[in-house]
Amino acid sequence: MKRVYNFSAGPAMLPAEVLKRAQDEMMDWNGSGMCVMEMSHRGKEYVSIAEKAEADLRELMAVPSNYKILFLQGGASTQFAMIPMNLLGDSKNADYIYTGSWSKKAISEAKKFCSVNVAASSEKEKFTTIPDVSTWNLDKNAAYVHYTPNETIEGLEFQFIPDVGDKPLVADMSSTILSRPIDVSKFGLIYAGAQKNIGPAGLVIVIIREDLLDKVSGTVPTMLQYKTHVEAESMYNTPPTYSWYIAGLVFDWLKRNGGLSKMAEINKTKADKLYSAIDSSSMYRNPVDKPHRSWMNVPFILKNADLDKPFLEEAKKSGLVTLAGHRSVGGMRASIYNAMPMEGVDALIEFMKEFERKNG
Ligand SMILES: *Cc1c(COP(=O)(O)O)cnc(C)c1O
């Protein structure tokens, strides 16, 4: 069996231990004689799996008791619509911070439901920076403020939580959740597609403050109301049971490996190493302002784009795969989520140096 270092932005690598455990439990989960995929979501075995996953996530992220955790479907992209549908209340306005490709998608979806005030944008700077919070032009009538803490495509990350006063702060944490401890109480709503740092695609996690649940109008479709899923404990209909189970194994793995403060330490080390290799070379370049560089997604360009193809081909031969940048930006991108081991980053840096030596 051969395993590669997979730098995909998502679906991304999962911890090998998690995959092995899923393999061990495939035919017979804990003496049940069933695979988790075959279990009724209402049966006591599956309910115990679901409850443990939720409790472990609550513990890992220190989620306060006045927040609900939901395990939903439809990816982060469905949240782009559910957020305005559920949180606008009587307001017709929402603030959005425009820092890259994912916030752009969130904005264009929100425009179907309300008047979007783009309170700050780094479009002019090609999303290489984050406008200083003191310059944000927030609308006092806005129902909430939405931002994207980590722009997966541009590799731009907020290394701080913006202070937006009393307004609920809504965050698309798809590509940064669980990468470090965060203060959940600073947010109204957090959401994250699972396929980056949580588990398999098909699952999206929503963490919502209870007082925001009652703003929704009865005309919103039942499946698109957070309230429905809170009342049914994410089992209004059949949830993505297997993805939820694997997410639970990942949470368990995180707990056994030092939790989120340990992850933060490792993630910072991995990112620092890779950025310093890029900055000290004359072959590679990362355009993002240093204080706003992402720990999770590290884009870089080669000084000569003709070398892109050989770079990718030779990297693949060395067991380093999915390094091509997003089709909208080109170049390279190394996604180094929690499951990417230090050895994977070291191997990439070694390869980059060798490639520069041969082609520089
Ligand atoms: C991947 C990603 C999405 C889209 O997630 P889907 O689950 O495919 O809908 C949204 N936002 C961010 C920041 C992402 O990284």
Image (cartoon, rainbow, N blue to C red):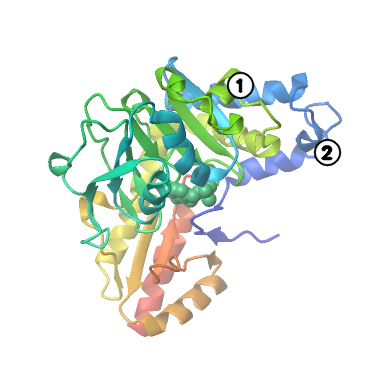
Using residue 261 as the reference point, say whether residue 50 is left or right of it: right
Q: Amino acid at mark 2?
A: Met
Using residue 221 as the reference point, say whether residue 354 is left or right of it: left
User: On the image, numbered disc 2 is attached to which residue?
Assistant: 27
Using residue 322 as the reference point, say whether residue 270 is left or right of it: left
Q: Residue at x 66, y 34 (%)?
A: 245
Where the N terminus falls, by quadrant?
A: bottom right
Q: Residues within 10 Å of mark 1 (few under 14, many from 20)?
A: some
Using residue 103 as the reference point, say whether residue 86 is left or right of it: right
Q: Residue at x 47, y 55 (%)?
A: 343
Coordinates of residue 33 in the picture (x, y in percent): 86, 30
Q: Does dot 1 land on a helix, a strand or a loop?
A: loop
Q: How many callouts does the rendering have?
A: 2
Coordinates of residue 187 in the picture (x, y in percent): 34, 28
Q: Residue at x 58, y 24 (%)?
A: 228
Q: Quadrant of residue 5?
A: bottom right
Q: Residues within 10 Å of mark 2 (few under 14, many from 20)?
A: some
Residue 340 visible to the viewer:
no
Q: Disc 1, ligand 1: is the CB inside 8 Å?
A: no
Q: Does dot 2 land on a helix, a strand or a loop?
A: loop
Separation of residues labelled 2 and 1 (CA atoms) = 27 Å
Coordinates of residue 246 in the picture (x, y in percent): 64, 38
Q: Earlier in the sequence, mark 2 or mark 1?
A: 2
User: On the image, numbered disc 1 is attached to which residue?
Assistant: 233
Q: Nearer the viewer, residue 251 or 63?
A: 63
